[in-house]
Image (cartoon, rainbow, N blue to C red):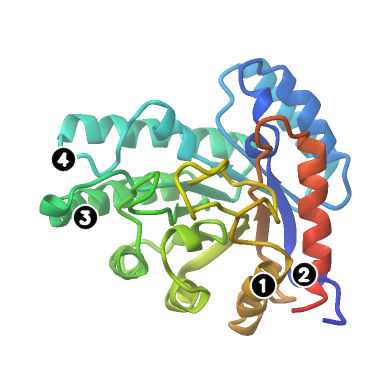
Amino acid sequence: MIDSFEQYLRIGTIHHVSYPQSGPDEHEKLISMKKILCDEFFDVVEVGHVNDNSVRQEMISMIRTAHLGGVAFGGQGITLSRKLNINDLDTDRRLLAVQALKEGIDEAYEFGASHFAFLAGRYTEDTIEESFSALVESVEDLCSYAANKGDLVVEIEVFDYDIEKCSLIGPVDRVVRLAREVTGRHANFNVQIDSSHIPLLHETLDQNILPVVPYLSHVHMGNAVMRGRDMPGYGDNHPRFGYPDSENDTQELADYLRILLQVGFLNKLERPMVSFEVKPQPGEDPDLVLANAKRTLKQAWRFV
């Protein structure tokens, strides 16, 4: 590829995944956030829930000062950390999950985010249709709530359905079914995919990406280990590119980006958000893991 990748996308990273050690002490989040914001490689930062209001306000101020090209908010941790499920068949529990995500939408607007992501919950095969109906009801509630406050894009992230997250959304046929049903009534709904989740879904790039192109809003780049449950990094743990016994490295990232370019998702007019989701594994330095991601992207782009 002759053109630089910056002409086709806005590159970002997920703050709380790149620097997970900042979680217990929220003031530590400011230190790692500054590292990202001072790195001109990044046009976008993806943030998560910040409980401490003073820390949150400082992060917002830092982001505004840095003059970024975009902010996204990941609400996945809101439900995961509280063991909530937006397709719970217990209505009271489901509404708790929806309310928690509405509070996340409020926080996303506070950050000035353009995208708010969440995930579907667990399910059982014998009640899958009931779970799907509950999910549609929850998603439409979230879309309406967000639309009444502004122009935030509400997007569901596609996760594995049988390895770790065991999410209803899920295999590509259910992704498309949900997107078709919800977008018919809510223009602010979209889909988010992640190259680290595609192997976990037992799908090829074409199978995973092509059917959802009309609904894509922004995407993640990452890696996964799935060859054995006893292997380090197994499951939805987002190890660095080229991690031992993992699925994605330079060539796989190039293939992912090439398809996104061919279908028009990566383009010079809109320059969509494309963020790293890489996490340091035990004993690894987060700065080095992020350097790995940046270097892998530059190398992969040469083969796109």
> Which secondary structure, mark 2?
helix
Q: Which residue is mark 1?
A: 257
Q: Nearer the viewer, mark 4 or mark 2?
A: 2
- Labelled pair 1, 2 in contact (Cβ < 8 Å): yes
Q: CA distance from mark 4 to mark 1?
A: 38 Å
Question: Residue at point 42% right, 64% down?
Answer: 187
Circle nearer the N terminus (1, 2): 1
Q: Amino acid at mark 2?
A: Ala
Give the CA separation, mark 3 to mark 4: 10 Å
Distance (Cα) linking label 1 and label 2: 8 Å
Q: Disc 2 designates what residue?
A: 300
In x, y percent, where is residue 301?
A: 79, 72
Whichever of callouts 4 and 2 sits on the residue coming sooner in the sequence is 4
Query: Residue 134: horizontal and vertical position, in percent?
Result: 20, 48
Residue 221, placed above or below residue 255 = above
Q: Which residue is mark 4?
A: 89
State the residue in front, 183 or 293.
293
Residue indicated by mark 3: 132
Query: How much space separates mark 3 and mark 1, taking CA atoms?
Result: 31 Å
Q: Amino acid at mark 1?
A: Leu
- Give whichever of 118, 253 is nearer the camera: 253
Residue 247 seen in the current view: yes
